[in-house]
Image (tube, coloured by chain):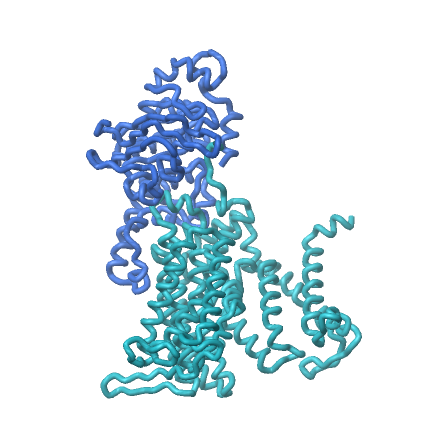
Amino acid sequence: MSDDYIFDVKNVTLRFGGVVSLNDVSLHQNRGEILAVIGPNGAGKTSLFNSLTGVYRPQVGTITFSGEPGHSVSVIGRKPHLLNGAGIARTFQASRMFSALTTYENVKIGAESHKGLGAVGAMLGGPATRRGEKLSDSRTWELLDFVGLRAEANTLSASLSYGARRRLEIARGLATNPKVLLLDEPAAGTNPAEKLELTSLIRKVRDRMGVSILLIEHDMKMVMSLAERLYVLNFGGVIAEGTPEEIRANDAVVVAYLGSSDTGEAAQPSPSETEDTDAQG
Amino acid sequence: MIKQWLGSPLARRVGTTTALAVLLMVMTGPSGSTSQPTAGFVQSFSERSSFFGLFVTQRWLVWAALALIVSALIRVAKWLKSDYAEMVAIPGRLARSAQAPFQTKKPVRFGTYGVLMIVAILLPVFVTDGFWQQSLVEQVAIFVLLALGLNVVVGFAGLLDLGFVAFYAIGAYATAWVTGALPAAAPFGVHLDPFWAIPIAIAIAMASGVLLGIPTLRLRGDYLAIVTLGFGEIVTIFLNNEYGITGGSTGSHQVPHFTFHVGPIKYAWGLGPVPYYYLTLGFVVLFLIIFSRLEHSRVGRSWTAIREDEVAAESIGINPLKYKVMAFAIGAASAGFAGVMTAAQTNFLSPQTFLLSFSINILVLVIFGGMGSIIGVVCGALLVQVVSTWMDHYTPFGFQSQDLYMYLGAILVAMMIFRPAGLIPARRRKREIAMSEAGEGHMDEMLTGDTP
């Protein structure tokens, strides 16, 4: 294992009863990399995400996360909230904001979730609590500015547009000071203009905050322009790995998507397929 | 035609109010027997009785009129675009209501609280009747404390706790134990003043809340309700059967009153209810401050997050179990505290007080007032407790105290239909209900992902 890997996944198999969702998957992500995982519906992409964040517990294999060089933790068997504390943040396929809270409150929850319990302090309203509140307030505003949601701070998160919800989820994840951000189909349900905004935002997250990005996406244009390296999953296994150019030229990938040999351009999924993915959430 | 009408809101309202009227006829009629279960219903047509000494008529007429008035009032309320109307209007209005200032202006708020405080302080001056003074402590103030505590569990953390009475019982019996009023010897043979029982009872109640919570709070919804219900029963049965420890079904009659003795200041609470009223009022105010701070703190926001979407909450580092146990412990502590107040004030303990129906009673107060809304819960507790005490004491139109839970049940049903978020809804809860009606919510949604 290299010290430069932020995620090192080795021979992971995840089963639900008799159904094999991930089959002997091995992959790694370099520190500071924008890595994408693509594949047809049902290929096991979200299962991989859920295994990486501790929601699912693969039966076989190891997943090592090292937020800092030389400081690694084993992911399998750890609870999601502990992994978040270690530096893994994520967004969901169908945005899962706390919809009865405002944009501001959503981000603030992320900013303050790792500051101990403080029930007694909260009840008494002591100076330490007030200082903590101030800190998370300024952090929240900072992040809202970063994703461009300051104007929507007091809007209920449920009444935000799809694009704004995605940005809110990213801000909420970033509020927990992660080392890696896992984005599960960030472009699903967004319009072309929002897609462009998201692409530049994701790049900004990596460049300015130094957060590694792991991305699942169906929108090939976005994936190819963002990702530095890709893995292709099909039927729970890795079928290809490489740079966007290499993947575009890979026959196995084209077959997985279209079932027959065709040009690389056709790797873009049809609109109906994208819609199916949305309906799943 | 008929089918269409049956589906209309008007038909629903007529149906509901008719059902309500029939229910009231059955409930308020002369007591029937198992051989004549419909006696109340039948006699409400055939017999005439007196109402409030004002007029004599058949009972069904009164209830039908009442049902009509109620449905008319609901109409008017909707027409006035009350909170309810706002609640179902999505999402433009929802967005606007969120953009409104988060809280009313400070001077207005503190002014209102000040006026309410003065009213509460002067109340015993105006309420000179001994029965009502007693009831203000035993039936109202204590219940407000309990409802505030259960609101943390049910309203803030969203956990259905049907065994809340157990912690109340634990608090009360812990008081009796440390003051030496139980067959079980007081710890170290020292008989303490009930004031010292407060921290001890709170600690014991809290510890039992944590012990019950850690294994059971992994369960969701209905399962948790059943486990807590079982816990409540276990505690009651223990109190009833362990003569050597708890005094069994006779309980204890010797819990001393509070006394206060620091330096030259000496005061002893006695049989008079007014000093107890002020003592309890002080604690109610303290609880109000503490809990509203908690609601608007990190802890309160985390509870909301867990209630709405546990998976998302975990993904941003919130440990659901920890926060649920915390809510449980805080609820248990306040019930334990209420137990101390009751034990010291009435001097008397009996397992018959700590039944399942008591837990349900507190739950009704919380749901009626508005889950998660502190001010709503206080108002709900005041209203329901004052009215039920009044009905119990003056027995208007043949009310019998064993009927109380039928009425409380009817209140719950009516609330669920007409005002599901409660009398004074919590802002966040209101939004949640409005959104789930619009199909926007994420509550109890399955984990998203590729189907394996």
Q: Is residue A113 above or below residue A200?
A: below
Q: Is residue A39 above or below residue B56?
A: above
- In terms of depth relative to the viewer, which is nearer, A266 or B175? B175
Number of numbered discs visible in the structure rendering: 0
* Residue B321 percent location from the top left of the image: 38, 52
Please tell me which residue lies in front, A95 or A10: A10
Instruction: Single out the residue that lies furthest toward the right.
Output: B46
Identity of the residue drawn at 47% across and 51% down: B220
Q: Give me the chain that's cyan.
A: B
Q: Is residue B238 above or below residue A23?
A: below
**Residue that sits furthest to the left in the current view:** A70
The answer to whether residue B334 is visible is yes
Point out the image quarter for the N terminus of chain A.
top left
Report x, y in % for residue A143. Answer: 31, 43
The chain assigned the colour blue in the figure is A
Residue pictured at 54% horizontal, 54% vertical: B87
Viewer-proximal residue among B91 and A119: A119
Q: Is residue B376 visible?
A: no
Seen at 60% across and 82% down, the residue is B394
Q: Residue furthest front?
A: B244
- Expressed as whole percent of the image width and height from the top left, the position of residue B236 reads 48, 69
Instruction: Name the image quarter holding residue B418.
Output: bottom right
Q: Is residue A82 left or right of residue B30?
A: left
In the rendered structure, the answer to whether residue B67 lies left or right of residue B233 reads right
Question: How far across and how far down the image is residue A227, in percent?
Answer: 34, 25
